[in-house]
Image: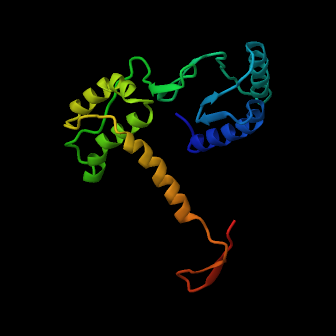
Amino acid sequence: MGSYSGAETCELIGVYMLSLIAPKFKDEVGLYHDDGIAVCKATPREIEKTKQEVSNVFKSNGLKITIEANKKVVNFLDVTFDLSSGSYKPYMKPNNKLLYVHRLSNHPPALLKNISQNINKLLTNISSNQQVFNEAIAPYQQALEESGYNFKLKFDPQAKWATRKSKARNKKEQSPEKKDHLVQSSMGQQCQDQPE
């Protein structure tokens, strides 16, 4: 069992370590909690040298790291990336059992309504095409049915693009204007927000 600030500490250390190794990969490196992935276009010999350098950076900070290099197919979180073909598909660890909140549970109706749709959207987003999606959905469909849902998983390419469009639109809507804004607080004081 971890400390109360364990997750935050992990994130801070991760960001710090990422800042130390990112230049070695021309910033083509990512980290999620304790899992990382990097893309390096170099010869196998150069990659082995970079692997040693990264390992030494971690060692000098009192940390250990396991690095797998020179791979063409990589499992990262819930996605398998095939670097040769540029395709990607859902990934599940062996012996992983999918469990979803049961449809008849005492959870808010909005949450229950969105579970099956969100699973469908996730699988669409991490499948490079419909064939990949159809090959991967069987365990997810079974888990949904076992949890009382009648939803049929189907590849929805519009959902894939809608997510990206809505995020871009929201960024535009939230962009600060070039002028200062006056904000009145509940205490009746005025403060001025400066755009960054």
Report x, y in % for residue 169: 50, 58
**Residue beneath the point at 31% across and 24% down:** 139
Examine the image and state in which quarter residue 157 appears. top left
**Residue 179, placed above or below residue 44:** below
Using residue 133 as the reference point, say whether residue 44 is left or right of it.
right
Using residue 14 as the reference point, say whether residue 102 is left or right of it.
left
Q: Which residue reaches farthest bottom? A: 188
**Residue beneath the point at 62% across and 84% down:** 190
Report x, y in % for residue 16: 72, 40
**Residue 164, placed above or below residue 130:** below
Q: Quadrant of the C terminus?
A: bottom right
Q: How is the image coloured?
A: rainbow
Report x, y in % for residue 132: 39, 25
Q: Which residue reaches farthest top? A: 45
Using residue 103 as the reference point, say whether residue 59 is left or right of it.
right
**Residue beneath the point at 39% across and 22% down:** 96
Report x, y in % for residue 86: 54, 25
Examine the image and state in which quarter residue 69 appears. top right
**Residue 162, placed above or below residue 136:** below
**Residue beneath the point at 39% across and 35% down:** 124
Of 190 and 23, nearer the camera is 23
Of 76 and 166, nearer the camera is 166
